Amino acid sequence: MPSPIETLKGAEGTIFKDRDGSQQPLLLLPHLTDEEFRRLEASVPCPIPDEARELFRYARGFRVPNLIGGPHKLLTEIDLSGLEAEFGLEQVFPHARSIAGDGCGNFWVIDLTSDSQSWGPVFYACHDAPVIVYQTDSLAHFIEEALRGGNSPWVSEIADVNAALTSRIWRENPGVLSFEQCADSSDADLKEFAGSLDLTYEFVDLRAPKLGDGFSWGRYGSRSVVKRFGEKRIFANQRKSRWQRFKDAWK
């Protein structure tokens, strides 16, 4: 697969047309300055990978109307460095870099850890419904899909995550492991994580995810308790009864 910078350079000169016939060219965002590189380095838990460093010296991102289509003109600007964007949910992504938003308060984020060797993976963090969805491990692939959605028929994996796959996770709650499954598992990480919690928790293992995998971080109300197993992408949700959720709402 081409590198992120090769992918973006290959898209220079592309003209995008929305459903109304309006045309706009791809617009690159300015590259990071030396001072911005220092700020970025100070804010992440790992060295900036060479591939990302090369990209950010060329352009920090890009802008084009209606990148993934739809009535809300989503993803009109993507800052791949995530330098200026603030993001919460520290219990899920302690060192997230927010690289794009959908205009409705939901964001695509890079989940970095101390041993990250690339600028990824990319997750979609949604608050309505309150779910996390895995997008891709490849920054180049994320760029390709964002650009693919900018022209007819305005479809992409990013649009899929934003709509159908988010709804599926909220509706079906797939891939959930019970406390008993993890406590009795031959997988040392699952067993250790379960041993640190109790039987009110359920678990989702995203160490080797595929497009559309994820979990409902807010399934049990606005005061949901979500934990992560250190830097590994195993997550636990504390199940709460309706009565407990009712009491939480009045605290």
Image: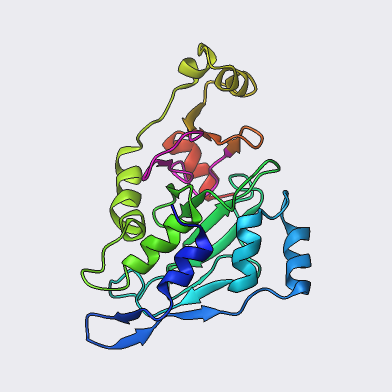
Q: Quadrant of residue 13?
A: bottom left
Asked if residue 105 shows in the view, the reply is no
Identified at 31% across, 57% down, the residue is 163
Front one among 148 and 160 = 148
Q: Quadrant of residue 190?
A: top right
The number of callouts visible is 0
244 up-or-down from 159: above or below:
above
> Where residue 6 sits: x, y (%)?
49, 64
> Where residue 208 sits: x, y (%)?
47, 34
90 left or right of 208 in image? right
26 left or right of 87 in image? left
236 left or right of 116 in image? left
249 up-or-down from 193: above or below:
below
Identified at 39% across, 53% down, the residue is 129
Classified by dominant secondary structure, the portion drawn in magenta counts as: loop
**Residues drawn in magenta:** 206-226
> Where residue 204 sits: x, y (%)?
47, 32
6 left or right of 56 in image? left
> Where residue 188 sits: x, y (%)?
59, 17
Front one among 155 and 101 = 155
Report if residue 214 lies within the magenta region.
yes
- For the view shown, which residue lies furthest in the bottom direction? 22
Identified at 27% across, 88% down, the residue is 22
194 up-or-down from 101: above or below:
above
Report if residue 40 lies within the magenta region.
no
Identified at 32% across, 61% down, the residue is 159
Q: How is the image coloured?
A: rainbow
Front one among 16 and 191 = 16
Asked if residue 118 shows in the view, the reply is yes
Front one among 155 and 182 = 155
